[in-house]
Amino acid sequence: MFTGEAQLYTYMVLISEVTTPEIHLRWYLDTAGMKRSTAYLINGVVIFIGWLVIKMHAFGFVLVFGVPSALGILNLMWFGKIIKGLAKTLAKRRSRTKELDSEN
């Protein structure tokens, strides 16, 4: 650490934590019963975009070749769950919008 050789890896880990506040906000919104709110949807989209840009795209090469494989696999697993959750939320919102349109 004193030689400066580990700085790249330290920065990678710190930058990959940029999505942590959004993940915590998701928990707060869920606990407050706001799963159907616009804030919850926007937060989910921000988590998806942040995870895609920061963990999958920008550091994809480094995560695969520079970080132990277990961490890369774990990030891929979580990204898959984020995609499924976002798709589920958007599908529910779309069906609810269609129901409201058909009532009018």
Image (spheres, helix red, strand yellow):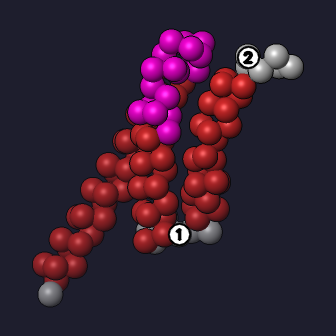
Label 2's element? loop
**For mark 1, what is the residue?**
34
Res 24 visible: yes
Mark 2 to mark 1: distance in Å? 45 Å
Q: Would you say the magenta stretch is mainly helix, strand or loop?
A: helix
Check the image and name the residue furthest to the front: 3
Residue 60 as seen in the image, left or right of residue 31: left
Q: Quadrant of residue 95?
A: bottom left
* Residue 9 quadrant: top right
- Magenta residues (range): 54-72
Where, quadrant-wise, is the N terminus in this rendering? top right
Query: Which of the pair 96/86 is nearer the observer?
Result: 86
**Horizontal and vertical percent position of residue 52:** 42, 40
Above or below, 90 relative to 14: below
Q: Residue 5 — which label?
A: 2
Q: In what quadrant of the picture does the C terminus appear?
A: bottom left
Horizontal side of residue 5 vs 92, given as left or right: right
User: Does residue 81 appear anywhere in the picture?
Assistant: no
| Disc 2 versus disc 1: nearer the observer | 2
Q: Name which quarter of the figure residue 17 lies in.
A: top right
Estimate the x, y position of residue 88 in percent, counting from the top left: 34, 50
Q: Tell me which residue sits at (62%, 69%) in the image.
A: 32
In terms of secondary structure, where does tag 1 sit?
A: loop
Q: Give the amino acid at mark 1.
A: Met
Rendering coords of residue 78 (x, y %): 50, 33
Disc 2 residue type?
A: Glu
Give the residue displayed 58% in from the left and 64% down from the top: 29
Q: Is residue 2 left or right of residue 33?
A: right
